Image: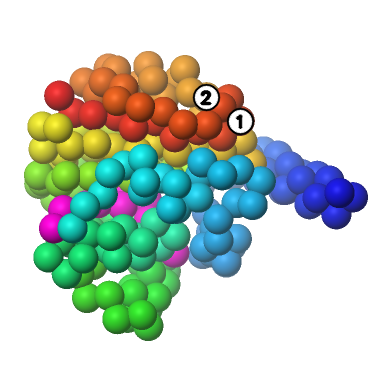
């Protein structure tokens, strides 16, 4: 129990320091920290996010702000070889990491795109599913990013937005819902609580 409290304290200190120091994406040097599921919360684990997202074989999915690929790889496995995943990130170093990880496990159904979310750089859809995991707070224009995600999805497509309090750029559920509603999304389902949650947002 003591070790858990110490770990929580260190994570909180890191998050506060990071938030105070920078408003940038996770540096590639910290990639190992975000490659693994957060042990403190269940709903933000990759398997839990994808279970709520209803990913099926043959779907087209897009991982927005993919980082080193914590969601990209399980997404690619879930959609199978008849489906595809587009991994999008601003940092070429992160894209190189996720590409190397995909190659190491033989996943050939993933494409990679360097793009700034909210800047009109996403490729046209339609995608069936999208993920935005602890990324929204890092974006300069959050409204534009969600509007762009909305346009990338087909009608009936679903975006999973996950936020966790230990992330330096944590966004409250209310603020995300306000932005999502303005973009045209409607809430399909949600998991978790105030400190860690996933919103499943549908394009009508």
Q: Of 202 and 32, which appears nearest the observer?
A: 202
Label 2, label 1: how far apart the Cα atoms are? 8 Å
Give the residue at the far right of this rendering.
Answer: 2
Q: Of 14 and 195, which appears nearest the observer?
A: 195
Label 1's element?
loop
In which quadrant will I find the C terminus?
top left
**Residue at 41%, 28% in the rendered image:** 190
Total of numbered circles in the picture?
Answer: 2
Disc number placed over residue 172 in the picture, else none: 2
Q: Is residue 65 left or right of residue 149?
A: right
**Residue at 31%, 22% in the rendered image:** 187
Which quarter of the figure has residue 19?
top right
Percent position (x, y) of residue 34? Answer: 54, 58
**Residue at 37%, 83% in the rendered image:** 104
Confirm whether residue 102 shows in the render: yes
Rendered view: 54 above or below 77:
above
Q: Which residue is mark 1?
A: 195
Percent position (x, y) of residue 12? Answer: 73, 42
Q: Answer whether residue 23 is magenta in the image.
A: no
**Residue at 36%, 61% in the rendered image:** 74
Highlighted magenta segment, given as a residue range: 58-68
Label 2's element?
loop
* Badge 1 density bin: few <14, some 14–19, many ≥20, Cα 10 Å: some
CB atoms of marks 2 and 1 within 8 Å: no
Q: Of 2 and 181, which appears nearest the observer?
A: 2
Q: Nearer the viewer, mark 2 or mark 1?
A: 1
Rendered view: 104 above or below 51:
below
């Amino acid at each position: 129990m003591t070790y858990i409290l110490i770990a929580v304290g260190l994570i909180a200190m890191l998050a506060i320091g990071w938030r105070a120091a920078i408003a940038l994406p996770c540096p590639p040097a910290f990639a190992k920290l975000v490659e693994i599921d957060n042990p403190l919360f269940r709903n933000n684990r990759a398997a839990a996010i994808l279970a709520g997202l209803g990913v099926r074989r043959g779907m087209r999915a897009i991982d927005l702000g993919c980082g080193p690929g914590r969601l990209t790889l399980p997404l690619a496995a879930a959609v199978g070889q008849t489906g595809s995943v587009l991994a999008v990130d601003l940092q070429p170093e992160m894209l190189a990491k996720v590409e190397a990880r995909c190659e190491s496990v033989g996943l050939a159904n993933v494409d990679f795109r360097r793009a700034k979310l909210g800047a009109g750089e996403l490729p046209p859809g339609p995608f069936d599913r999208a993920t935005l995991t602890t990324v929204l707070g890092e974006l300069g224009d959050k409204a534009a990013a969600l509007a762009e995600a909305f346009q990338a999805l087909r009608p009936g497509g679903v975006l999973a937005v996950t936020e966790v309090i230990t992330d330096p750029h944590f966004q409250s559920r209310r603020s995300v819902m306000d932005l999502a509603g303005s973009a045209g999304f409607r809430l399909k389902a949600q998991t978790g609580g105030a400190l860690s949650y996933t919103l499943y947002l549908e394009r009508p």
